[in-house]
Amino acid sequence: MNSTSGGPPVLEPLIRCVFEKIPPSPALLALARFTYETGSFFGPAAGPGPVVFHMDAGKLTFSAEGAVYFKNTAVDRTAEIREVTPGTSFDVTPGDQLLVPGDTPHTARSSGTTTAAVMGVAMFPQVPPQQFPPGIQFIPLVLGMANALPSPPILVTLDRFTFGPGTSDGRAASGPGLVWVESGSMSAIVSSGNVQFSRAASAGPFSQPEQVAPGNPVTLGSGDGLFIQSGSSFTLRNSGTGPATVVQAITGSDTVDLRKRIAKQYFYEVWNSGNLSLVDALVAPGYVQHRPLNGQMPGPDGLRQFVKSWRTAFPDTSVSVDLCVGEGPTVATRWTARGTHRNSFLGIAPSGKPVSISGITTFRIDAGMIHEAWEHWDQAGFLLQVGAIPLRNQ
């Protein structure tokens, strides 16, 4: 993301997961909602491709004949996605994430006192039959046939963005993606690639979408959507007078190159730009920073605390990534940070001196998020440069 005006959109991450097996292209990529009235029952059934859900409301009691993958954030926000033993019955509640691989027979029952609702991303070889048991409603939001798919395993992300009036945001899609306007009014400009749009007021997402001509703005109202083919780039802008909310699903290869891009985003967009709203998109809820500063809080809140403290002390902070290498889930970076010591840091009074320090940060990145970081930086050199310790006489 690259916000161009009005400040960055506020991000709420909903889903981070990996599809290990996917259908061959062309394949249907869909963003949809399901609602389950209390007591309604689905299954046993098996979809031809993988589906991942974010639970929005109510409660579902779920079981499957094969392995499924579950993140129970309602009980423990730091929980990572885990495999559930086949045949196990478990409850899915608001905030939870559930991944069902293709061809996995499963059942779901609405077991709460209110209607259950989920939002999910699915990938199928073709449009599936639209027949569901009484009390269960399928609400397609945006869908389309992806001409090309990344090589599996692929990372799937689902995020909700809130745009303030005038906020614009440039995006590039390495894999096919979906954008749905949940509320407000947005405009979209395609820079390159193949992007289609569908209107909520038309016959629905199964009707023939319209092509977006590059360079021509398209106005999107509540319920409208975009289908983005691989390799497309576009800009979204809040064209209304109030806030607008957009839900975006993006796919891409879960590779070392992707993990390296995430590591670079960490430095360039969080540290350089000070965009703390990106922390929740890049850093897992159970994030562990080894060797934290004295008094630093744990998890993502501690990272925000560290970045804010540093950028307050060095408001002209500039970090360059000098080397970035990766193997498996591990990415190692060598970086250089520069800035002017304008305010207190770690109890050291502002010196007004420029500093340049180097360090190495090693990350563990899994399912598109940073889970651990080991940081080693030249603290002695920093203290010398700000005058906290004297230079030794030669």
Image: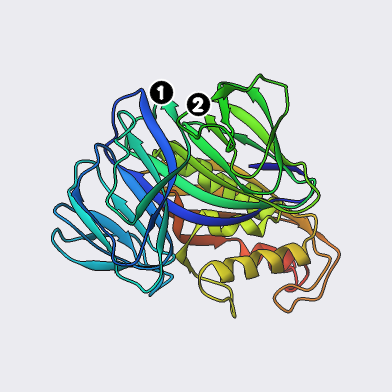
Task: Point out the residue furthest to the right here.
Answer: 352
Query: Left or right: 152 with respect to 262?
Result: left
Label of residue 148 in the image: 1
Q: How many callouts does the rendering have?
A: 2
Callout 2 secondary element: loop
In the picture, residue 240 is in which quadrant? top right
* Residue 213 in picture, x, y percent from top left: 66, 19
Residue at x 54% of width, y 71% of height: 292
Query: Left or right: 374 with respect to 88?
Result: right
Q: Look at the numbered discs 2 and 1 and tell me whether their residues touch, using CB distance below 8 Å.
A: yes
Residue at x 39% of width, y 38% of height: 255
How far apart in space, not on screen, are marks 2 and 1 (Cα)? 8 Å
Query: Left or right: 370 with respect to 164?
Result: left
In the picture, residue 113 is in which quadrant? bottom left
Q: Amino acid at mark 2?
A: Gln
Label of residue 229 in the image: 2
User: Do we see residue 64 in this rendering?
Assistant: yes
Residue at x 42% of width, y 59% of height: 117
Residue at x 16% of width, y 61% of height: 85
Q: Amino acid at mark 1?
A: Ala
Callout 1 secondary element: loop
**Disc on the earlier residue, 2 or 1:** 1
In the picture, residue 149 is in which quadrant? top left
